[in-house]
Amino acid sequence: MGPGRGDRGRAPLRLKAIWEFRYPPEVLAEGMDVVEAIWDDMRSYAGYLSHVIVEDVEDPGHILVVSEWTSSEDADRVRDEYAENPNRVRADELVSEPRRRIVAKRVA
């Protein structure tokens, strides 16, 4: 098996929760502030490991957050606990279409 295949020597599973935000140009700056505030908050939750925020260079305002969690249960629990947070509510008000979440695991 090549690198990254099999279980020997592999780090524990780090679940990826990928969030997609689409902000129209007129609210992009505020939208980015809100996204950054949300993910700054995540650092205080049990199960959170890390995140990176990226913007589609061909579609400004299309923002992805790739976060890592210890388990899907932790990611789901924090999503539910954070549901009424003003930052999350504001993010939903600003997006041009509903936010989407993809839960994934590394395969290679």
Image: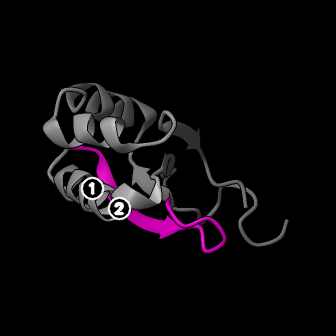
Residue highlighted by disc 1: 39
Specify the amino acid type for callout 2: Ser
Residue at 75% of width from left, 72% of height from top?
Answer: 3
Q: Is residue 16 left or right of residue 57?
A: left
Q: Is residue 65 left or right of residue 32?
A: right
Image position, residue 73 (x, y; %)? 38, 29
Residue that label 2 marks: 50
Crowdedness near tag 1: few (<14), some (14–19) or many (≥20) residues, C-alpha within 10 Å: some
**How does the figure colour the protein chain or chains?**
one colour
Q: Is residue 74 rendered to the left or right of residue 103?
A: left
- Quadrant where the C terminus sits is bottom right
Element carrying mark 1: helix
Crowding around mark 2 (Cα neighbors within 10 Å: few <14, some 14 to 19, many 20+) is: some
Quarter holding the N terminus is bottom right
- Which residue is more in the foreground, 49 or 26? 26
Horizontal and vertical percent position of residue 67: 42, 55
Q: Is residue 94 above or below residue 73?
A: below
- In the rendered image, residue 11, in percent from the top left (x then y), is placed at 51, 61
| Nearer to me, 41 or 21 | 21
Separation of residues labelled 1 and 2 (CA atoms): 9 Å
**Which region is colored magenta?**
46-61
Q: Secondary structure at mark 2?
A: strand
Residue 80, which numbered label? none
Going 55% across and 39% down the picture, which residue do you hit?
103
> Does residue 102 lie above or below 28 as drawn?
above
In the image shown, does 85 or 79 lie closer to the viewer?
A: 85
Q: Is residue 14 magenta?
A: no
User: Residue 47 lies in what quarter of the image?
Assistant: top left
Residue at x-position 48% and y-position 41%: 96
